[in-house]
Amino acid sequence: MTREIGIYSYDKEINRFLDSLEELPEAFICASDYVAHFLEIYLSEHKDRIRGGIMVTGYDGSSEYINVDGLITTAEVKTGTLGKRLAMQIIYRMEHEDAPYELTYIKPSIIFRDSVLYG
């Protein structure tokens, strides 16, 4: 599933997508721990569809979603630092309007875990 999801319909859209799959895959790579949270809820309610466990990864390292916090491989995104870096870039662009555009990469730390749910 790669299309855009409305902010208030993640659970319904993810459930609909998962229900449409004849068989669940061996792994899911989620765009965020928020998405992984909804996936885990679905998996916990449909354990009969799981063959031998499912690996789940997230992205952002959020501890907000306790059902996946500490269980899945994720990227630790330091949002405070990221926000400060973006603010600095905005100020630079305002002060140097004719400067060439730049592409900045910020590499998060990867937190590796077993990540196999219900296996």
Image (spheres, rainbow, N blue to C red):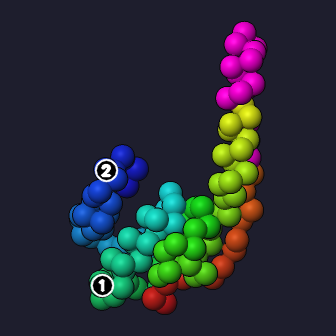
Viewer-nearest of discs 1 and 2: 2
| Helix, strand or loop for disc 1 | helix
| Front-most of residues 6 and 19 | 6
Residue 90 point in image, percent of width and height: 67, 29
Residue 62 point in image, percent of width and height: 58, 68
Q: Can residue 28 be seen in this view?
A: no
Residue at the far top: name it: 98
Q: Can residue 106 be seen in this view?
A: yes
Q: What amino acid is labelled 1 in the image?
A: Glu
Residue tagged by mark 1?
45
Residue tagged by mark 2?
6
Instruction: Give the magenta-colored segment's residue range.
Output: 90-106
Give neighbour class at mark 1: few <14, some 14-19, many 20+ (Cα, 10 Å): few
Which residue sits at x=71%, y=44%?
84
Q: Quadrant of residue 103?
A: top right
Query: What type of secondary structure mainly makes up the magenta span?
Result: loop
| Helix, strand or loop for disc 2 | loop
Quarter of the image containing the N terminus?
bottom left
Whether residue 103 is in magenta: the answer is: yes
| Front-most of residues 68 and 18 | 68
Q: What amino acid is labelled 2 in the image?
A: Gly
Residue 64 point in image, percent of width and height: 52, 72
Whether residue 15 sits left or right of residue 104 in the image: it is left
Q: In which quarter of the image is residue 13?
A: bottom left
